[in-house]
Image (cartoon, rainbow, N blue to C red):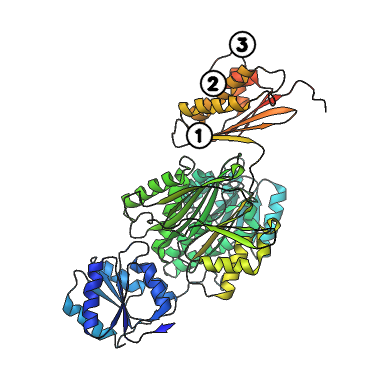
Amino acid sequence: MIFKKNSILVVDDNPFNRELISHIAKEKGFKIVEASNGKEAIDKIKESNFVLVFMDMIMPIMDGYEATRKIRSMGLDIPIIAVSAMSFKQDRQKSLEAGCNDFLPKPLNTTDLEDMIEKYSKGKSKQEIDTPTVKYFVQNINFRDFPILLVEENDGLCKKYIEILKKSGFEVTRVKNGSEAFEFIKEERFKIILTNIFTPGIDGLGLLILTRRQYPQILFFIYTPKYDPDTFQLAIQQGVNGIIPQYQFEGSAIRMIEIALHQRHQEEVKQTSTSNMIKIAQDQLIGFGCDVQCKFCDIAYYSLKEAGGDMARCRHFNKEGRCGIIVADVAGHDVMSSYISAIFLGMLLTIWDKNQNPMELFKIINFELNKFGYNETHVCATAILWDRNRNKMKIATAGNPGGIFINKNPDGSLNYKEFQGGGMALGLLKTHDLFFEEEVSFDKEGFLFIFSDGIEKEQLLHIIAENPSMLDKENFCGISQKILDGVLAKEKQKDDMVLATLYIRGEATSKLHYGFLSSYEGVDKACEWFNENLTHENFPKGKDKDLILLAVRESLLNAVEHGNKYNNNAYVDLSVSFSPKELKINISDEGAGFSLNDKIKQIDTLTDIRIGSRGLPLMLLASDKVEVDGGTVSLIFNNNVEVIS
């Protein structure tokens, strides 16, 4: 570190303001270093020692509030003077809570400016920053004092869950359905309800609603085998204390109950606990979008404090390998930061399926954040639309670092390619043209790392260079956690850290793929593409080509009209695979799918080929087999001529 005894750091995105402060400070014999945003300020402070900092509070990239908190988290008690045109009482208070020593309103008064330099450059009033750490776990709570009513029909799951709960000290009573549970609740001896969302009679959500109306003091938790954003939102609205993914029950249930008990304890002693509740909601939203973690995406996260803002989420859009990944960083580490992160994820989960394009996603969220006035607590984000089977990707960034793709050479040496990062944070400005976007195709096997600014590129590369075996495919599971642990083993954590790692296979599958945004023109072009690829060599023998083309067209129209409901921003994927025995065509849309059996019953009486009814009469007539899996319709054509090898 370079020590400059008489240096003052001036941080402001307006060069005129920097010049004014610098001129007066230079007249008093100080050396001046300038920065145009909070991120630059942090970099300067890492390089030099300053006697005083003048910090503008509203700046792009990183504002003064976040920069001040980061400086304090570094253990530095250097005097920081907030400089802002926002000079209401609450603005001054917010600056002091962030860690500033004093406040200087704009437009700047030269006399006041000179007084600040005189007062603080001599070290007369250095504020010691004391940021208390709130612990989740309360030692004086006896779990036996909180009897649990478990609602589970399955005997095997029930036995497993009771064993976990009793091992932690809880008293557990089991019932098989929601109706029976509500009769037990009337006894008012249970402090906690833990239920499967799917139960006979009254289901988990119904039981939650009834319980909240009559017995609001009971802690209520739902576990679910499958994540559904609409159900999640409804449960949150009804006041659920926690939603537990069923596959994470053993690792998450006790901790989530313990956090809720701590929250209740805090309320009883009249201590503030808003940040904890928001953190609980945020923790439930950080993680994987699939029921089971896939072998292509790995996520790890370390929060700097109980109230944080960083987050990561993945989303599986269809069985053809279309996925979405979000890594986001909300400015600050306070209650507002956690609140904004929950708001951000609520927006994301509501619109993600229908707006898979990363840039369109950013535009919508940015508009909503501005509309509701959340611009001061902005969100830096990276969004990815990943076609796994085609090794193609769209990446958009709004204030976040760019990603890094790393792969190994045959001799074990490493190559890496860095993707563009930066851009303007979401919610900071109304304009949409300051987000960055690029399309990428991968032709080599490797790993793509996406991270928040709590992780530096050099740290990541250093950890991997020390242990290149991390990049072996068989070591993929848990790679993100290993890297974060490696960073923290060498350096003190300075910010929230979130890392998403994607395994890139490097070669496309044997299927042929075609994708398009929903439109009738797109359907026509997709049919042309299919016709060109349905050659004599791969055409199923004994089939009518025109009938196959009509069936494919009807399925594509079904995707546009019914699955995507004419949404021009929604995708349709057409995948074709050939084998000696069959031709299989998958058409995937962004809808929830439909019950094939129910639709077949509706058209059983039809004796002619009629367009409509989702195109099923024609699909069923032309195909040897039709399958529906969520938003994917599969048309299967058997080769009726025996292949002689």
| Residue type at tag 3 | Thr
Q: Are marks 3 and 1 in contact (CB under 8 Å)?
A: no
Q: Is 251 on the left-hand or right-hand side of 339?
A: right
Q: How many other residues sit within 10 Å of disc 1, few (<14), some (14-19) or many (≥20)? A: some
Please give the residue where the numbered disc 2 appears in the rendered image: 613
Disc 2 versus disc 3: distance between alpha carbons?
A: 14 Å
Secondary element under disc 3, as helix, strand or loop, is loop
Return the residue nearer the eye: 568 or 545.
545
The disc, 1 or 2, on the residue closer to the chain's N-terminal end is: 1
The disc, 3 or 1, on the residue closer to the chain's N-terminal end is: 1
Secondary element under disc 1, as helix, strand or loop, is strand
- Tell me the number on the disc at residue 607: 3
| Residue type at tag 2 | Ser
- Tell me the number on the disc at residue 516: 1
Image height of 493 relative to 472, above or below:
below
Disc 3 versus disc 1: distance between alpha carbons?
A: 33 Å
